[in-house]
Image (tube, grey):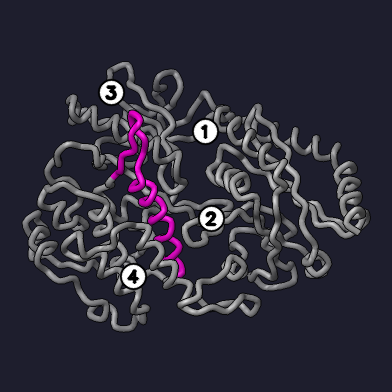
Amino acid sequence: MRDEYYGRLLVQRYQLLEIAGKGSMGQVYQAKDTLLGGVIVAVNFLSRSKMNQRVRDRFMREATISALLGEKSIHIVKVRDYGVDEEEMPFYVMEYLKGDSLKEAMQNQPMPLPKFFSFMRQICLGLQCAHDGIEIDGNVTQVVHRDIKPSNIIIIKDATLGELVKVLDFGIALLKSDESPTGFMGTPAYCSPEQMDGKALDNRADIYSLGIMMFQMLTAELPLKPKTSSFDGWFQSHHYQKPKLFSEVRAKLDLPQALMDIVNRCMAKTAEQRPNSVTEVLKVLEQIEQNSAPLTTQSQSYTANTPPTVEAICLQSIWPKDKPRAEIVFPQLIQYRETEIATMWIMLSRSDIEKYRNNKPHSQFLFVGSPHPMLLWLTTLYQDEQQHRMLPCYLDLKKPIGEKILQILNQTGSYRLILFALEGDERCVCTIEGKVPTRKMQLLKEWLLESQNTGANHGQIKESKRSLKEELDTLKPKLVASLQRQISKKH
């Protein structure tokens, strides 16, 4: 819907469009960033009705916390700018996220387990980043969100990740360096007993809220039912009412016992009885998922006492439904225990896969820093001068996945090719491990630093990509000759 601010040009840069929603302290507008070619952003204004110095300070702190956390995790909304308009109204600019909240995604029915595990993994990674802390004035300070609930989680379509989940609204977040609690703040249905009391909090308050939300995702119902929906009604329920049993809510859910146990632990009335960290919750959920998921015929077998290998996890990959069945290449991150693996997903004919599956891939990188920082990650599967496949993969280093993959390649020097057959089903056929030579890892480190210190110019992405393609066309004959010499020396 539109209001009187439609079309207004904010600080000679952001052209306000429609109201996109509400934050914890004000109105959020969809806007065009005219400086960057009309890129759509979200502008969050502090409400006039809350215009006092204390709230202004908190609003600026929300922007600061979100900006710092958004740079550390792709699972937290990114903040791009902060300022005040000509009427001294504070605002900050965020990435515009077009998607559904978790509340909308649940659709009042139990969520399928594969989707539950995927969403929870990403939510936990976002919260883990907050709980690990941000550096303010030279000190690392933990952040407690205090308002974890389905409406503060958004799911957006992503070309590489399929569905990307982000945690929103750090408007009432608590820094552990705060000298004293600020009384009760939060959403009563999801608040821990100690939060209802207005006591000092730590990360386990968020874990309680996470437990409430997980129960709701799995059953489509809240675990507590107060006598009234007033603050006092919820206060009594969180302090004294036992959460519903899963069997009471949905007799035919057939959930793993370990999953019900971890949800119940998160909802414990006292913080000491809950898991100590989101990392612990994440590990348990991943183990449950691994133990309950069927393996493909190519996967390596494992038991509850033997965690799956990287190979086994990669072999469970399924071709995304939003990708065409064609000979294409794209980057992807795969979660493995507490880390992520850099992978390149490739669809080829089955004959090509059989031809190259036992060959060692060769990696080459080309970089352009302007007008927009991009990396060409080129992997070549080689038999001889006539039989080789070059697999170009372009990484936008101003996108979270591009930056993250470059970081992983620089830090670990390893990656996986995930191969799918054109003539087959959606399951992975095989994987190939690749290594980045040490001399190239130093280059990657330099390029990563340069890209982080270079501004984005999204309107010129095509120009950067064209430059990389031209450079690749020039280098192709030299690359093939170089590979031929390397292989000849080995033989």
Q: Nearer the viewer, residue 262 or 103?
A: 262
In the rendered structure, which disc, 2 or 3, sits on the residue that comes first in sequence? 3
Q: Are marks 4 and 1 in contact (CB under 8 Å)?
A: no
Residue range corresponding to the magenta coloring: 114-143
**Residue 218 badge:** 4
Distance in Å between CA atoms under marks 1 and 2: 29 Å
Q: Nearer the viewer, residue 408 or 127?
A: 408
Q: Report whether residue 22 is seen.
A: no
Which residue, given by chain and number where applicable, does mark 3 sit on? Answer: 89
Q: Residues within 10 Å of mark 2 (few under 14, many from 20)?
A: some
Q: In the image, what residue occupies the spot 26% across and 35% down? A: 26
Distance in Å between CA atoms under marks 4 and 3: 42 Å
Whether 286 is drawn above or below 136: the answer is below
Whether 70 is drawn above or below 155: the answer is above
Identify the element where label 4 is drawn.
Answer: helix
Give the amino acid type for the residue marked by disc 2 in the picture: Glu
Q: Nearer the viewer, mark 4 or mark 3?
A: 4
Residue 51 at what x, y percent from top left? Answer: 19, 26
Give the amino acid type for the residue marked by disc 4 in the picture: Leu
Q: Is residue 341 magenta?
A: no
Q: Nearer the viewer, mark 2 or mark 4?
A: 2
Q: In the image, what residue occupies the spot 59% across and 70% down? A: 312
In the rendered structure, which disc, 1 or 3, sits on the residue that comes first in sequence? 1
Which residue, given by chain and number where applicable, does mark 2 sit on? Answer: 340
Q: In the image, what residue occupies the spot 90% across and 53% down? A: 489
Distance in Å between CA atoms under marks 2 and 3: 41 Å
Distance in Å between CA atoms under marks 2 and 4: 26 Å
